[in-house]
Image (cartoon, rainbow, N blue to C red):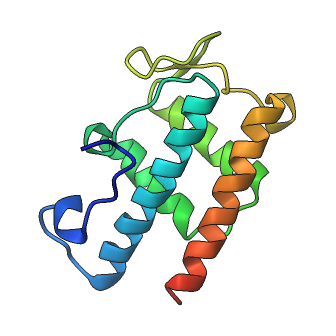
Amino acid sequence: MTDTTLLNSDQLFDDPRTPEDEALRFYAHIVHCMNNEICKLNNEQTIEWKDLPDYMLEGLKGAVWSGRTPRESHEAWMQDRLANGWVLGPVKSIENKVSPCLVPYDKLPYSQKVKDCLVTGMNEFLKTLYKR
């Protein structure tokens, strides 16, 4: 199964706690797949859903309902990565926790800002599907 294949809710996690948690994880998976495809276009390393560390999964879940702007999303992502031991470096390496995007939003390459905008738009769309 490739990362872009959406899983049904039973495959996402072992013990769904509530319908809202189930929807949140499902939508986080959609956003993750979209993000991975954009990363591939940018020749960036990706990680499959099943291999996500807990802190990345929690970050995705937090982003889905957040209502953050692209700038706010980037700042929250950057703080989360720094708190989990990531460092600034020239080439993204998930294994070594290195990212060239650990910079203020204004210093991001245009392609990264576009990705943040697309993710924000997808999050807003998903919120309309699941009225909270």
Residue in front for this viewpoint, 31 or 43:
43
Number of marks present in the image shown: 0
**Residue 97 drawn at (x, y percent):** 46, 20
Residue 51 percent location from the top left of the image: 27, 37
**Residue 40: quarter of image:** top right
Quadrant where the N terminus sits is top left
Determine the residue positioned at 12% across, 62% down.
14
Q: Which residue, as the protein is rendered here, is positioned at the far left?
A: 14
Foreground of the two, 106 or 38: 38
Give me the residue at 36% from left, 81% from top: 20
Quarter of the image for residue 94 reads top left
Where residue 17 sits: x, y (%)? 21, 76
Work out whether 124 lies above or below 20: above
Residue at x 80%, y 37% (from the top left corner): 105
Residue placed farthest to the top in the image?
Answer: 90
Q: Residue furthest bottom?
A: 131
Q: In this view, does 5 lie above or below 122?
A: above
Horizontal and vertical percent position of residue 72:
73, 53
- Residue name at image x 38 percent, y 44 percent: 55
Q: Taking 48 as reference, is 14 left or right? A: left
